[in-house]
Each structure stands twice: as structure tokens, then as C-alpha cells.
Amino acid sequence: AIPYPIHYIDFEASRVALPYHAGMRPYGLLAFQWSCHTVDAPGGAPRHAEWLNIESAWPSGEFVRTLRACVGNTGAIAVWSPFEASTLRDLREQLEARGELSPELATWLDGLPARMVDLHKIAQEEYYHPLMKGRTSIKVVLDALWQTDPQMREQCAAWSGLALDANADPYKALPPIEIGGVERSVHDGTGAIEAYEMMLFSALGTDPDARARWSRLLKQYCELDTLSMVLIHEHWRRLS
């Protein structure tokens, strides 16, 4: 029942006591990255797009505008939690408070909830796999299916180049990147926030090469989150 094209999206964001930018309140939301895989038809290979803020300027306006350019006005938007919807509501309020919310952009944002499909709810209410052991986070579901679905592993290798055996954990297999003489890695949302802070607000981020390495680290993690949704949804599609 989910209409194509399907845009699988994931956001990275943080809330910190001391605001990153002028005009932000303490613990205000700062959305700094999105990833999107778009599938045009059942079984089709996904197309990937992404955006990551690498500037010291307030990023929320660019976040929303680039996302709109990616997902447009048609197709379903697949997520794995209510976080993306709540983030977009928060960003709408921020843009309106700063006088950057055009009527056209407001209309687009207001229409997004009707297009969203929470795959996590499907995992909670309509799917069971013994290796999940009752848990439904995207990493747990992906790991359970990864061990038992060779076609999923083949699709992942074909679509991303990440070729791993059944015993591997795709998230843990993300390659570390050396930055400042230390191997760094990002395997979860907390690690993404820490990497973003290091990239923009630490001495390690002042070097252009180091900033580019932090950027690659963040992008490979967020890309895997949206690819995971594609792989899981494709598995369910084949089952049904």
C-alpha cells in the first residue's frame, strides 16, 4: 500500500546546553545531516542523496531546502521512528521565528506528515524474527535478517559495495578513518553528534583535510541507516 517512489530518510541532530549559533535557545535542536535513498519501483536499485553541514553558519534553513529538493512533492517518505517528523516540526518553528519560512516552504512542510510511513511501527506490530528477541531497533532488525537472508547481503553488495558474510555486523564493519593520528569511527547517533562537534568546533576541525575525513565518517554512517531501511523493506516485500 506504500506508493512509489519511496524516499527512505534519516536525520542526525543534537541538543546542547550551550547553543552552537546566535539566536538558538539552550538545548535547542540543531539538525546537521540527512541521508536519503530513493527507490522508484519495487525491487529497484536505490538512488542515494545526502547533505551534511560543514560550515559554521546556522544550518537549519539549508537542511530543509536541500531535503525538499531531494524528496520533492511526490512519493512516500519512509522513516524508522517519529524523530524525523518531530525534527521537521521543530525546524518549521525555527524558520518561522527567523522570518525564513516562505508560504511555499510552509505548505510543503505541512504536507509531509501525510506522506510519512514509520517502518518501525510495522516491525513492532506486524513482524517477528527469532533473532530479534523482541527488539525492534533498526540495527537489531537488520542484523537478524542479515544472518538469514543471503539475497539481502547480495543486494547490499550490489548497491553499496559493502560485501560481508552472514556473521558480520554491517554497522560495526564501517571502516574507521584516521584523523589526527587516531582511528575514529561512528556506529550510532551519539557517535555522530560527537563527530560533528569535533569536525566543526574542535582544533581537529580547523584543518581542511581533517574536516573532510570527519565528513566522510559521518556520511558513511548516515548512509547505512537509510540503506538499512531499504534492505529491510525489500525483505518484507519479497516475503509478502
Image: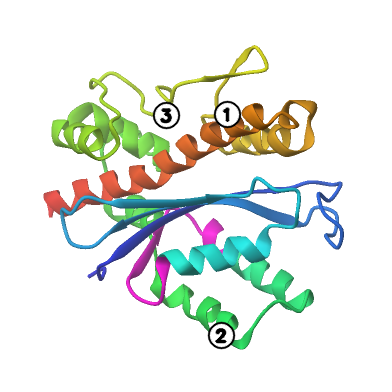
Residue at mark 1? 213
Task: Provide residue 81's location: percent of width, then percent of height.
Answer: 48, 55
Residue sitting at x 75%, y 48%: 56
Image quarter in which the N terminus is found:
bottom left
Crowd class of label 2 (few under 14; some 14 to 19; many from 20; radius 10 Å): few
* Residue 65 shown left or right of residue 169 in the figure: right
Q: Callout 2, which amino acid?
A: Glu
Q: Quadrant of residue 87?
A: bottom right
* Residue 56 shown left or right of residue 119 in the figure: right
Task: Provide residue 158's location: percent of width, then percent of height.
Answer: 20, 36
| Residue at the far top in the pictured view | 181
Q: Callout 3, which amino acid?
A: Tyr
* Residue 1 shown left or right of residue 137 in the figure: left
Disc nearer the start of the sequence (2/3): 2
Give the mark toward the camera: 2 or 1: 1
Residue at mark 3? 171
Residue at mark 2? 104
Whether residue 223 appears in this view of the structure is yes
Residue sitting at x 41%, y 53%: 49
Whether residue 135 appears in this view of the structure is no
Residue 72 lies in the magenta-colored region: yes
Q: Nearer the viewer, residue 183 or 206?
A: 206
Crowd class of label 3 (few under 14; some 14 to 19; many from 20; radius 10 Å): some
Q: Is residue 86 above or below residue 146?
A: below
Q: Is residue 223 above or below residue 111?
A: above
Residue 76 lies in the magenta-colored region: yes
Q: Quadrant of residue 90?
A: bottom right
